[in-house]
Image: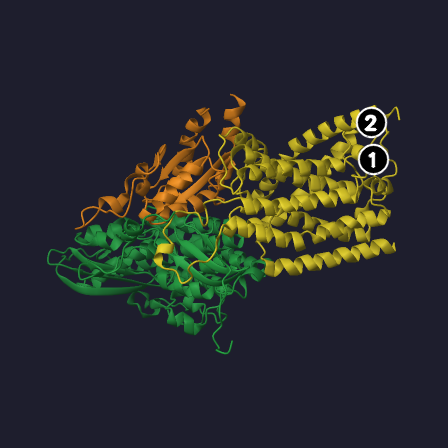
Chain colours: A orange, B yellow, C green
């Protein structure tokens, strides 16, 4: 394996963008995944809050109206190669907010799924997904990053 | 005079070897630091090479992006200056440079450290990341109580904090640096090392390893100064608890927010080399073991002892919160007072 | 100046969010500062607006529970429970005592998990990573218990109308596991709290900032631990029938600062442990769900519950077909945040963010409403603002 892929495999910086939803996935990602029990750092995944540093963007939540432009901007500021992991049923298909509506018929306030705003590479379903699933999702996003020029 | 070309050749050779070793070695330090923290936090933590070596390499392979800065060219160049400053800072403390124009003295060290601190002010005033004021959310449309007020980027606020840290935060380190020089009654590093380690000379043979006979560290002013030096080291590296100018929770990363891909790799190198250089300077000045690339045993001893400060730093980072200026001012003044006390004792000895 | 009014000179504005390490949830803090001192603060809390209350309108009441639980991912059980309490109160549905006990057990378990999230988050904001990690590690044992009871770590879905889901019934072995875990947790947690209180650096960061007097707490209606840390002895649990059988204290603190808000929560966890022990030991036998009810027309009914952050109100009516009309949720966070907006004035910038975090803001709870007045929107929704003014350049 060449040096480029090895270096990319050995240091993965992950950024979390939470775009409105119920908070559950967010807590699972930030707190459970980084808690000593799951500890992603042992798999060479480091958390960052700066898009300029990130490789993988984890997006959770339905994309609320006001979060559309920030999300696009965050995505655009991540230097290539980059991957996007959509975590949670909200990010994958809009969950109850999109699919379980009463008289109004259609929820115009949210832009879920995340795919409609930025390209998504890996989808991790679940409400809320287990921390193990999130880690597996980040790993699934790796081949794209490793093979990029 | 006929030694001159030979000396210049040696200077170049030692500089290249020393700089290369310093950069490579410094890339291991963040991993060690992170590992120690992780073990304190009861988790496994990243492999030693991940936060330093592999991260830097990976950022080197990322695609270049233009930073959002007022003057992108200047902003980019700051990190090159930074690397230059920290590498020179380290080289000035290696034996070949001691004889060159008096740079191997406290003046060289203090001057370069001050330049290093100025860089953070410049970086902060240049960088304009969208993560704060520039975030495209309609917040003004809500009708604010305060209209027409200057909206600052967090990096600019970081620059203001950097100025304050320059004024007060770096004082302890400089006072502590003075102590070994005061004890040697000289401004040159060579006399400080000669005082502690008389057996050491530039012309000694390759495998000799003279053990310092009277390290400054084991005297009363020395130990006081060493404590002050350590806290000053943390302040100069802007690590917790003195990381207010890049506090993650309000300024995210401060002035270095916009460094991406290769520039971020260079920034990592700059920070890590500074971490190593200050640690190596400590070993040189307080224990009397200089980093001499042509005496491998001395060099290895220096490298090994240079782990001391980063390890202590890691433990401190794991056990301390970020302090605000409410606590930093008294802490810096108190520590400077201890440093001055050590200085007075050392002058009296 | 002759008038007693103090003129506030504001030098500049600093704004953080919506994607920011200290916030995590999407909201925006605008701090108006002089040098390092916060002179005024403005919070924009509408970034996660999903129009939830509107979604309820016209849904059958059982299905609506699914949405009610997803109002918030930290206090999912509270919302689910309060949503069923509304209809149980309105249609006089009797709930078996065993179901009530299990609801209370889940409630207190999630309260502990929620308080531990706050500690983790607050210590991350303080900058003390080790304490934050330790808090998340402690929390994991309760996340496990919640998933044993309900089947999911985050959305246990324990309450249904008339009782609890039969899956969430506590078996004898699970009761034993809960008691064991609670003992184990209490021992570790005691050590954790002691270490926090004995840490001088952390305490110097927490003490003496973010003052909120009792009068202000009542004025802003800062409920829950936030109000109790200002000496306001107000806890909905003391008035609830479900909590009658249990013996517990309401923790208050008179010191009114950020430290008090942390300490009150730290001590509340012990009270929750007490309640869990009593409930598990005295768990009555019997059925767990009463299915003999029918959705029929119901007038507006309100239910109050002590959520982990303060007082929670759910209110709705049912039409003749049993569909939900005019759902209204009032969560504790908007009022608590308003109080924090007031409390953080005079702090350093870094401390102001800690003060705001110390009320345990849960933004997803509070950004769910659209003010609807007789079928007509009386305020501009965010969508309309964007359409009218466009994105700010």
Residue designated by label 2: B7
Return the residue nearer the eye: A148 or A65. A65
Image check: B300 left or right of C356?
right
Is residue B79 found left or right of C255 in the rendered image?
A: right
Labelled disc at residue A72: none
Q: Chain of mark 2?
A: B
Q: Position of residue B212 (x, y in %)?
A: 83, 40
Is residue B8 something one can see in this rendering? yes
The quarter holding residue A142 reads top left
Quadrant position of the N terminus of chain B in the picture? top right
Which of the image's four quarters has the C terminus of chain B?
bottom right
Query: How many numbered dots are placed on residues in this image?
Result: 2
| Disc 1: CA contacts within 10 A as few (<14), some (14-19) or many (>=20) | some
User: Depth check: C170 or C308 in front?
Assistant: C308
Q: Is residue C66 left or right of residue B211?
A: left
* Mark 1 lies on residue: B99
- Label 2, residues with CA under 10 Å away: few <14, some 14-19, many ≥20: few
Q: Residue at x 56, y 47 (%)?
A: B124
The residue shown at (58%, 40%) is B35
Chain of the residue displaying label 1: B
Is label 1 in contact with label 2 (beta carbons under 8 Å)?
yes
Q: Closer to the N terminus: mark 1 or mark 2? A: 2
Position above or below: C222 against A89: below
Instruction: Report how far apart the C-alphas of labels 1 and 2 lie in the structure.
Output: 10 Å
User: Regarding mark 1 in the picture, which secondary structure is present there?
Assistant: helix
Give the x, y percent position of residue C288.
25, 55
Give the percent coordinates (x, y) of residue C392.
Answer: 37, 49
Given residues B36 and A73, the one toward you in this image is A73
On the rendered structure, is C352 left or right of A123? right
Labels 1, 2: one chain: yes
Does residue C200 appear in this view? no
């Amino acid at each position: 394996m060449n040096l480029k892929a090895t270096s990319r495999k050995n240091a993965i910086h992950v950024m979390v963008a939470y775009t409105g939803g119920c908070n559950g996935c967010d807590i699972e990602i930030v707190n459970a995944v980084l808690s000593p029990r799951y500890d992603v750092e042992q798999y060479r995944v480091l958390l960052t809050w700066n898009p300029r540093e990130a490789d993988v963007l984890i997006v959770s939540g339905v994309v609320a109206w006001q979060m559309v432009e920030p999300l696009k901007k965050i995505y655009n500021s991540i230097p290539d190669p980059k991957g996007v992991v959509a975590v949670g049923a909200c990010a994958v298909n809009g969950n109850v907010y999109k699919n379980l509506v009463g008289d109004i018929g259609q929820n115009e306030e949210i832009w879920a799924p995340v795919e409609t705003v930025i390209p998504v590479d890996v989808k991790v379903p679940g409400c809320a997904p287990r921390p193990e699933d999130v880690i597996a999702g980040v790993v699934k996003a790796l081949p794209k990053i490793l093979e990029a020029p | 005079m006929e030694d001159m070309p030979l000396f210049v050749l040696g200077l170049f050779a030692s500089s290249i070897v020393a700089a290369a070793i310093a950069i490579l070695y410094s890339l291991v330090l963040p991993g060690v630091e992170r590992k120690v923290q992780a073990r304190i936090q009861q988790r496994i933590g990243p492999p030693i090479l991940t936060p330093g070596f592999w991260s830097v390499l990976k950022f080197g392979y990322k695609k270049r992006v233009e930073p959002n800065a007022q003057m992108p060219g200047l902003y980019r160049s700051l990190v090159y200056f930074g690397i230059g400053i920290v590498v020179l800072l380290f080289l000035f403390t290696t034996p070949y440079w001691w004889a060159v124009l008096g740079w191997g003295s406290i003046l060289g060290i203090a001057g370069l450290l001050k330049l290093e601190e100025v860089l953070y002010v410049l970086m902060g005033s240049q960088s304009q990341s969208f993560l704060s004021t520039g975030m495209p959310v309609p917040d003004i449309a809500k009708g604010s109580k305060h209209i027409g007020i200057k909206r600052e980027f967090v990096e600019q606020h970081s620059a203001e904090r950097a100025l304050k840290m320059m004024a007060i935060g770096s004082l302890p380190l400089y006072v502590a640096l003075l102590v070994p020089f005061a004890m040697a009654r000289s401004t040159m590093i060579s006399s400080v090392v000669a005082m502690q380690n008389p057996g050491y000379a530039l012309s000694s043979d390759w495998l000799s390893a003279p053990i310092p006979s009277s390290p400054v560290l084991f005297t009363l002013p020395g130990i006081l100064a060493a404590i002050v030096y350590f806290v000053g080291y943390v302040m100069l590296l802007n690590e917790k608890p003195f990381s207010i100018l890049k506090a993650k929770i309000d300024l995210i990363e401060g002035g270095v927010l916009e460094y991406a891909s290769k520039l971020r790799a260079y920034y990592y190198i700059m920070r890590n080399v500074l971490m190593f250089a200050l640690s190596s300077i400590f070993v040189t000045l307080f224990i009397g073991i200089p980093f001499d690339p042509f005496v491998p045993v001395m060099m290895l001893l220096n490298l090994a002892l240079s782990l001391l400060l980063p390890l202590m730093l890691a433990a401190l980072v794991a056990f301390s919160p970020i302090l605000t200026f409410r606590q930093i001012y008294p802490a810096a003044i108190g520590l400077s007072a201890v440093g001055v006390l050590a200085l007075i004792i050392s002058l009296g000895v | 100046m002759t008038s007693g009014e103090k003129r506030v000179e504001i030098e500049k504005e600093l704004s953080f969010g919506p994607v920011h390490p200290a916030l995590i949830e999407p909201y925006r803090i605008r701090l108006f500062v002089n040098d390092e001192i916060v002179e005024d603060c403005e919070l924009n809390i509408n970034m996660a607006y999903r129009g939830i209350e509107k979604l309820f309108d016209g849904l059958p009441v059982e299905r609506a529970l699914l949405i009610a639980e997803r109002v918030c991912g930290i206090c999912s059980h509270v919302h689910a429970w309060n949503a069923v309490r509304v209809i149980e109160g309105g249609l006089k549905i009797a709930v078996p005592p065993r179901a009530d006990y299990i609801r209370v057990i889940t409630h207190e378990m999630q309260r502990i998990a929620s308080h531990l999230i706050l500690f983790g988050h607050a210590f991350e904001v303080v900058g003390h990573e080790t304490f934050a990690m330790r808090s998340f590690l402690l929390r994991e044992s309760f996340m496990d218990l919640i998933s044993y009871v309900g089947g999911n770590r985050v959305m246990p879905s324990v309450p249904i109308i008339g009782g609890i889901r039969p899956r969430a019934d506590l078996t004898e072995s699970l009761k034993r596991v809960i008691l064991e875990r609670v003992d184990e947790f209490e021992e570790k947690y005691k050590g954790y709290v002691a270490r926090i209180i004995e840490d001088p650096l952390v305490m110097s960061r927490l003490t003496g900032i973010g003052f909120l007097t009792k009068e202000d707490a009542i004025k802003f209606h800062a409920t829950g631990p936030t109000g109790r840390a200002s000496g306001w002895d107000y806890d909905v649990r003391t008035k609830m029938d479900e909590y009658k059988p249990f013996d517990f204290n309401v923790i208050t603190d008179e010191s009114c600062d950020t430290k008090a808000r942390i300490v009150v929560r730290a001590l509340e966890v012990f009270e929750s442990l007490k309640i869990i022990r009593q409930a598990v030991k005295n768990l009555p036998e019997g059925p767990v769900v009463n299915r003999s009810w029918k959705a029929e027309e119901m007038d507006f009914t309100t239910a109050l519950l002590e959520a982990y952050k303060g007082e929670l109100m759910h209110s709705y009516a049912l039409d003749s077909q049993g569909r939900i009309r005019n759902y209204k949720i009032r969560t504790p966070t908007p009022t608590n945040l308003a109080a924090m907006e007031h409390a953080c004035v005079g702090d350093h910038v870094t401390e102001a963010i800690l003060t705001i975090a110390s009320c345990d803001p849960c933004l997803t709870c509070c950004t769910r409403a659209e003010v609807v007045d007789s079928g007509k929107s009386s305020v501009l929704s965010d969508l309309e603002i964007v359409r009218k003014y466009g994105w700010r350049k």
